[in-house]
Image (spheres, helix red, strand yellow):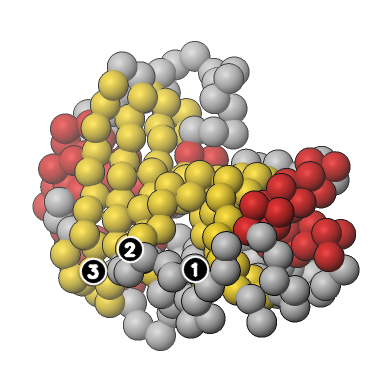
């Protein structure tokens, strides 16, 4: 049975998240419906990351198995045609045939997220639902300094949703960088995997370092507490983007 990798971008605003949920529209369901419209097959696709409601993606990856060996370009074109016809805000930006052991979730070696904060007093017009508007002036340098206390292998219970289903709260955070360009503050996080709500929880905590209400030591103490109650407010989903997923070895095509 041929397996395909698809690279997907989407505006998460109208969706209940990536994962299919009863009674709610999800990105996964939108793509699965497009697959059925294309070839009549009922399939379940697996994504690299289960983004929450309102979270966006420019580099989500998923895999799917089809009964027929279709050219990858045909798969991409057909899915986009049906997604567009259905009014979905989802696009398949690339498709390729891959080996049968490729798994979009478990084969991933790194995931890269971007969080965008617009730091100004004026409300958002073009950036509405695309960034977090913070009207209080933030010190991005202080936020970056505080972020480094979170880099490395730690127990991230403080920054883990109570609904998280991961077996362990211990993760290795490879990167957490904060930078400013004009009114835009960007926070970039990289790790092999993340806990549920981890990035948004860290961003909300770093915001407190940026507005001066928390020190670098306070952020480190929150991490060390390993207690969800020690976390700052969770940042809204609007500013979060799954940018890219890395895989250790090149995907091996099994058909043209």
Image vertical order of residue 249 relative to residue 241, above or below:
below
The kind of secondary structure element at disc 2 is strand
* Percent position of residue 107, x then y: 41, 74
**Mark 1 or mark 2, earlier in chain:** 2
Image vertical order of residue 163 relative to residue 256, above or below:
below
Q: Residue at x 58, y 46 (%)?
A: 93
User: Is 18 positioned to the left or the right of 35 in the image?
Assistant: left
Query: Can residue 172 be seen in the rendering of this structure?
Result: yes
Give the labeled residue for mark 2. 110
Give the labeled residue for mark 1. 253
Q: Where residue 172 is drawn, which disc sits there?
A: 3
The kind of secondary structure element at disc 1 is loop
- Closer to the camera, 72 or 139? 72
**Disc 3/disc 1 C-alpha distance (Å):** 31 Å
* Percent position of residue 59, x then y: 48, 50
Q: Residue at x 62, y 41 (%)?
A: 11
Question: For the image shown, how many numbered marks are present on the structure?
Answer: 3
Q: Nearer the viewer, mark 3 or mark 1?
A: 1
- Closer to the camera, 145 or 224? 145
**Mark 3 or mark 1, earlier in chain:** 3
Q: Residue at x 32, y 69 (%)?
A: 249
Image vertical order of residue 179 relative to residue 37, above or below:
above
């Amino acid at each position: 049975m041929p397996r395909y990798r698809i690279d997907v971008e989407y505006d998460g605003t109208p969706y209940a998240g990536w994962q299919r949920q009863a009674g709610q529209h999800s990105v996964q369901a939108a793509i699965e419906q497009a697959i059925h419209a294309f070839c009549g097959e009922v399939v379940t696709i697996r994504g690299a990351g289960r983004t929450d409601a309102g979270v966006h993606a420019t580099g989500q990856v998923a895999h799917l198995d089809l009964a027929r060996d279709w050219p990858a370009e045909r798969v991409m074109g057909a899915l986009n045609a049906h997604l567009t016809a259905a009014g979905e805000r989802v696009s398949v930006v690339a498709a390729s045939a891959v080996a049968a052991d490729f798994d979009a979730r478990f084969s991933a070696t790194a995931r890269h997220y971007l969080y965008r904060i617009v730091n100004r007093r004026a409300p958002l017009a073009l950036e509405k639902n695309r960034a977090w508007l913070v009207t209080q002036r933030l010190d991005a340098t202080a936020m970056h300094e505080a972020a480094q206390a979170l880099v490395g292998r730690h127990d991230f219970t403080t920054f883990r949703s109570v609904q998280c289903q991961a077996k362990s709260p211990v993760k290795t955070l490879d990167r957490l960088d904060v930078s400013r360009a004009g009114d835009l503050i960007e926070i970039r996080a990289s790790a092999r995997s993340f806990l549920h709500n981890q990035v948004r929880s860290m961003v909300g905590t770093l915001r407190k370092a940026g507005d001066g209400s928390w020190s670098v030591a306070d952020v480190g103490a929150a991490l060390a507490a390993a207690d969800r109650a020690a976390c700052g407010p969770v940042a809204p989903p609007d500013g979060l983007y799954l940018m890219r997923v890395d895989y250790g070895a090149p995907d091996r095509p099994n058909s043209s």
